[in-house]
Amino acid sequence: MRAIELMSSAEFRNLRLGGMMLAAASDEDNGPFQALRSLLRRGLHLANLARRPSVIEDGVLTQLVDILVGDGQFEDCRVPLQVVALDLLSARMVTLRSGSLATAVAASSAIPGVFPPVELDGLLLCDAGAVSSVPVAAARAASPDSVVLAIDPSRRLLPRQEIDTGMESLQRVATIARNWLTEIELEEADIVVRPRVGQRTWSDMTNLSSIVESGRDAMTKAMPELQEALSTHH
């Protein structure tokens, strides 16, 4: 719940997003979540991404992650952690398992076009969601003999009666491709948990407590299956 507390804080409001102050756009009725969503939409509409690296200026994502993670290292984690990202230069998935947690999380969270990629050891890293939104393969490779539990929070792609614009066509094709890749990867998981998030998009930051509750409910229902898998797995 620290993320929700962070985004409700004055510290978060004072961050500068693409040259715009979040506090200036904050909506009293919807809070900072809706304000951030509004800024993202405005930025995506106004920014000429052919001339600038991202909608949100460099350093903002790092500040956010630093607030949550601090100066922790992978070696400090009580439970072994690995973070995946996509290297734009080599077009390969990269698994980060040592060094700065903040750098790894920022790299894995850098949505292309929204946040600038993160430079690390000669790599140019960004969010790998376009090619591996649920990194089952990376988890399996890290621990071949373990039970792999995958969480799939993606929204289902509903049929549509018509597509009105070229942008809608591009967005729908991208979503179809991502869903297909996700389903292929999920086939390799031992257990798949799907929280009921409806048709919410990644930028919908309203009423996050209901999403947390959906995740808790889905995991509670999956516990018997997980316990059985753990008891029979060798």
Image (cartoon, rainbow, N blue to C red):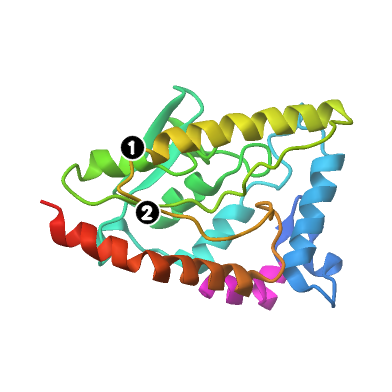
On the image, which quarter does residue 69 sit in? bottom left
In the image, 192 versus 60, the foreground residue is 192
Q: Is residue 182 above or below residue 71?
A: above
Classify 10 Å Cα crowding around label 1: few (below 14), some (14-19), many (20 and above): some
Task: Say what secondary structure mark 2 lies in.
Answer: loop
The percent position of residue 75, horizontal first and vertical second, equals: 25, 59
Residue on which the image places disc 2:
100
Classify 10 Å Cα crowding around label 2: few (below 14), some (14-19), many (20 and above): some
Task: State the residue at coordinates (67%, 76%).
Answer: 8
At label 1, the amino acid type is Ala
Magenta highlight: main SS: helix
- The magenta segment is 1-14
Task: Say what secondary structure mark 1 lies in.
Answer: helix
In the image, 139 versus 122, the foreground residue is 139
The percent position of residue 124, horizontal first and vertical second, equals: 49, 32
The percent position of residue 49, horizontal first and vertical second, equals: 76, 32
**Mark with earlier residue (2, 1):** 2
Q: In the shown orientation, is residue 192 left or right of residue 38?
A: left
Task: State the residue at coordinates (40%, 32%).
Answer: 93
Q: Is residue 39 above or below residue 167?
A: below
Residue that extends furthest to the left in the rendered view of this protein? 234
State yes or no: residue 3 in magenta: yes
Residue that extends furthest to the top in the rendered view of this protein? 90
Which of label 2 and label 1 is nearer to you? 1
At label 2, the amino acid type is Ser
The percent position of residue 163, horizontal first and vertical second, equals: 84, 31
Q: In the shown orientation, is residue 101 left or right of residue 176?
A: left
- Pointers 2 and 1 in contact (C-beta within 8 Å): no
Task: State the residue at coordinates (53%, 40%).
Answer: 129
Residue on which the image places disc 1:
137
In the image, 214 versus 201, the foreground residue is 214
Residue 19 appears in view? no
